[in-house]
Image (tube, rainbow, N blue to C red):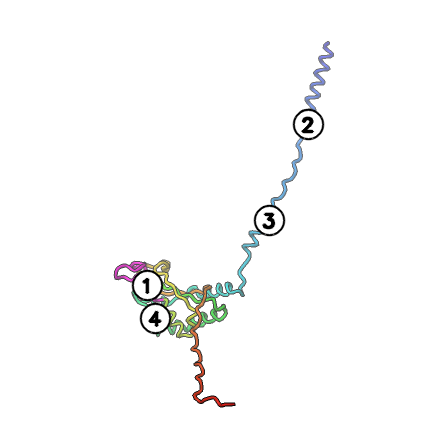
Amino acid sequence: MAKKILNFLLVGATAFSLSFCASSETKEQPAPEPQAQTNANDSSAASSRSIDLGSPEGIANTFNDKIKDFRYPDGITRPGFSYKKADVSAGDFSEWSKANVAVLKDALGKLPDSWVLQITGHTDQVGPEEAEGDKKGNVFYGDIRAKAVKQALVKQGIPANRIVTKSAGSSSPVSGLEAKDPKNRRVTFSFVAGTASAPPAQPEAQQQQPSSNPPQQQ
């Protein structure tokens, strides 16, 4: 009887040992599959695209970068427009145009006729933005300044139909200046896509007047 018990214990111990060894073996895990890079590649390709420098957008961007600091008055020779005025001084505008108008003409010559020079008028931050009582408002003064510079540029040979004007009022002051600083009273420039107005029509040729002589009989 004791021998049977002993054999039973030996068999059980052997089975337990084999089971333990089998469970302790490390199973090799399959390597994770690399994540798809499609979206990342698409995003990278999209971000690397740039506007064709020879396209109208590319030409405009190039010239807008050149004229980003253009302003009249220049803020140095003359700080800005007089308070509530759109005074374009013949003397300092002549000097300003010598340095800047050639670039404006060059850009318009390379851009399609539908692209225009946009002149934006600015004011200081004193007074109301819109008309209020007897005050005309900053938007008004920005507008008349832009239009005054447009007329001065037309005299310099830039076609009127290639220039548009707008007013920013006091919404875009020069960074770091006080609200009433005269350097805020200026115009700035940019090239934008738009529909240029047609040039003035030429007068039609006068219709031929009928001859006063009676037609000869054949």
Comes first in the chain, label 2 or label 3: 2
Per the model, the C-alpha gap separating discs 4 and 2 is: 96 Å
- What main secondary structure does the magenta stretch of the protein show? loop
Give the mark, 3 or 4, whose residue is nearer the N terminus. Answer: 3
Could you tell me residue 111's position as x and y percent?
49, 68
- Work out whether residue 109 or residue 187 is closer to the camera in this orientation and state it: 109
Instruction: Compare marks 1 and 2 and give the one earlier in the sequence.
Output: 2
Q: What element carries label 1?
A: helix
Q: Is 110 on the left-hand or right-hand side of 31?
A: left
Which mark sits nearer the N-terminus, 1 or 4?
4
SS state under label 4:
loop
Tell me whether circle 3 and circle 4 mark residues in contact (CB < 8 Å). Answer: no
Which residue, given by chain and number where applicable, does mark 4 sit on?
A: 88
- Nearer to us of marks 1 and 4 is 1
Mark 1 lies on residue: 140
Region in magenta: 123-145
- C-alpha separation, residue under disc 3 versus residue under disc 4: 58 Å
Query: What x and y, as percent, mark residue 110?
Result: 50, 69
Tag 1: residue type?
Phe
Quarter holding residue 198: bottom left
